[in-house]
Image: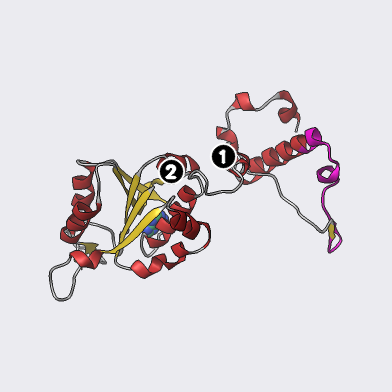
Amino acid sequence: MKVDIISIFPDYFAPLDLSLIGKARTTGTLQLAVHDLRTWTSDVHRTVDDSPYGGGPGMVMRPEPWGQALDAVVSDAATLVVPSPVGKPFTQADAQQLAGLDHLVFACGRYEGIDQRVIDDAADRMPVREVSLGDYVLFGGEVAVIVILEAVTRLLPGVLGNADSLTEESHAAGLLEAPVYTKPQSWRDREVPDVLRSGDHGRIARWRREQSLLRTAGRRPDMYAAYSPEHLDKKDRKA
Ligand code: ADE
């Protein structure tokens, strides 16, 4: 997958050299390039922002550098992703869809956002997704891009050693995952649940399922309510 990131703070993306994203870049699974938006400015101050039409606080990113940057970076296969507090909430399903695409271009807004015409102009030429990480406001899109890229990269073929991790994990099946334990068996007088040491795979699977349902109902009633009833069998209802 090809990924281009456009930002006024390219240094924010240094962590993308590390860990499994770094490895995906080394192996070529992820071809990532970070671009400084100011490359596409033409004045001596390399200005990227100006005051908003209609008044109000803060500054808005000017359309010209963004237009040129996108013209230089997008391909016929590109999807533009714009992290923004006014975007649609980003979910695991979105991560899965993005992981199936060939070329993602991320536009990192700062200040009060990017002039709307940049997004409207891009949308005439390519799929555009404005996505929000949650109902709070960050300084800019940079951290959101790192989050989205983590969620997407781990779904690319070959990135995770054990592909089962992807089917078993929280959100994969619309439920939160059950609690997990490792050695030692006893720690600060707290024991690993007996069932997990029973070797009875049927019992373990039932226990995990029950824990998963209890957790989801307690912590994410919204998710639990949306969980399709045909997936709940009689045993689950008793739990
Ligand atoms: N940029 C600023 N706030 C954001 C948010 N909540 N999600 C995504 N991008 C953002």
In this rendering, does residue 99 appear at all?
A: yes
Q: Pinpoint residue 21: horizontal percent, then vertical percent.
A: 48, 57
The disc placed on residue 172 is: 1
Residue beneath the point at 40% across and 51% down = 132
Would you identify the image quadrant in which residue 164 lies? top right
Q: Pinpoint residue 114: horizontal percent, then vertical percent.
A: 25, 57
Would you identify the image quadrant in which residue 239 lies? top right
Say which element carries label 2.
helix
Residue beneath the point at 50% across and 45% down = 155
Residue, disc 2: 99
The stretch of residues the image draws in magenta is: 187-204
Q: Pick out the residue farthest to the front.
A: 27
Residue beneath the point at 42% across and 61% down = 143
Q: Pinpoint residue 73: horizontal percent, then vertical percent.
A: 24, 53
Judged left or right of residue 82, residue 160 is right
- Identified by mark 1, the residue type is Ala
Instruction: Rate crowding at label 1 as few (under 14), some (14 to 19) or many (20 or more) other CA atoms within 10 Å.
Output: some
Would you identify the image quadrant in which residue 108 lies? bottom left
Judged left or right of residue 141, residue 171 is right
Reply above or below: 87 against 9.
above
